[in-house]
Amino acid sequence: MRVLLMAYGSRGDIAPLAGLAAQLRKLGAEVRVCAPPDEEFAKLLAGVGAELVPFGRDVRALRTGAPPSDAAAFAAELVAAHFDTVGKAAEDCDVLVASGLMPAGARSVAEKLGIRYVYAGFHPFEMPSPHYPPPPRPGPPAPPDMTDNQALWDLDTQKVNALYRQPLNAHRAAIGLAPVDDVRAHVFTERPWLAADPVLGPWEELPDLDVVQTGAWILHDERPLPADLEAFLDAGTPPVYVGFGSMPLSEATEIARTAVEAVR
């Protein structure tokens, strides 16, 4: 079996794919990964024996520099890469697993090729639910008096469509596929996967979304810690860990000092 995994995003989006790729290869599958061209992703995926097909811009450069000034143009750029680079990478594959920043064109690629398509998210808060609001997204802000979560998710649908629907449907028409009305629902499908730990990222069942929670996709690292780090961990009280995930911190020049002072 040949499996194509794809995501455009930071290390938090690519590392889970490396963990899944490692397990798939143990089961005898051939694995190809479409991911940004960052050197760290190339090394990460090479370490699990997965073929990397780079697409899109270097993510570290985007995170540390100025973000794209035109969100719609950047979305159209990614959609084009889905149909071009990702589409070519999927041609001899049996299944396509898509994740990361709104993979708007991935399902269309699978549809055209007649292969299975699965959308996977790595935290529950990107999946529409009345229990919490949607994450931030480019587009008009919600009115101050809009506090109902369902109304906010309806607004999110409009934002996604404004960014992705026109370029998506243009590419679909070019390969003979019908237009899509609701891009987010099209991408997520009615049965998305949630690759998150059920304790850390629990999912509350909904009647209109059959989420399959797989557990987290982790690349296990058996290497011993350096001796000086072991000594530090063993000395005195347990240390405090501070992490910032994938948040861009280009303007937070004193963030490390602020975090240390807050801990102290």
Image (cartoon, rainbow, N blue to C red):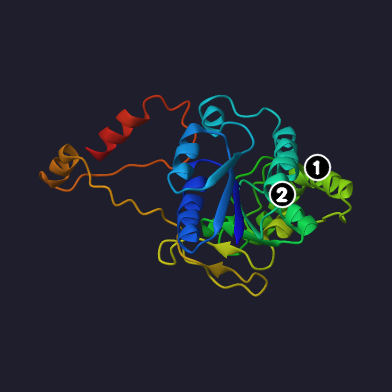
Q: Report x, y in % for residue 182.
A: 78, 56
Q: Out of 113 and 252, give the one closest to the viewer.
A: 113
Residue at image position (58%, 58%) is: 120
Q: Report x, y in % for residue 254.
A: 36, 26
Residue at image position (68%, 72%) is: 208
Determine the residue located farthest toward the left in the rendered image.
236
Query: Relative to residue 67, is residue 199 depicted above or below?
Result: below
Q: Out of 19 and 25, give the one closest to the viewer.
A: 25
Residue 167's label in the rendered image is 1
Residue at image position (31%, 35%) is: 259
Q: Report x, y in % for residue 253.
A: 40, 24
Q: Quadrant of residue 75?
A: top right
Q: Is residue 243 left or right of residue 214?
A: left
Please name the residue that numbered disc 2 is placed on.
Answer: 104
Question: Disc 1 marks which amino acid?
Answer: Pro
Can residue 120 be seen in this snapshot? yes
In terms of secondary structure, where does tag 1 sit? helix
Residue at image position (52%, 33%) is: 38
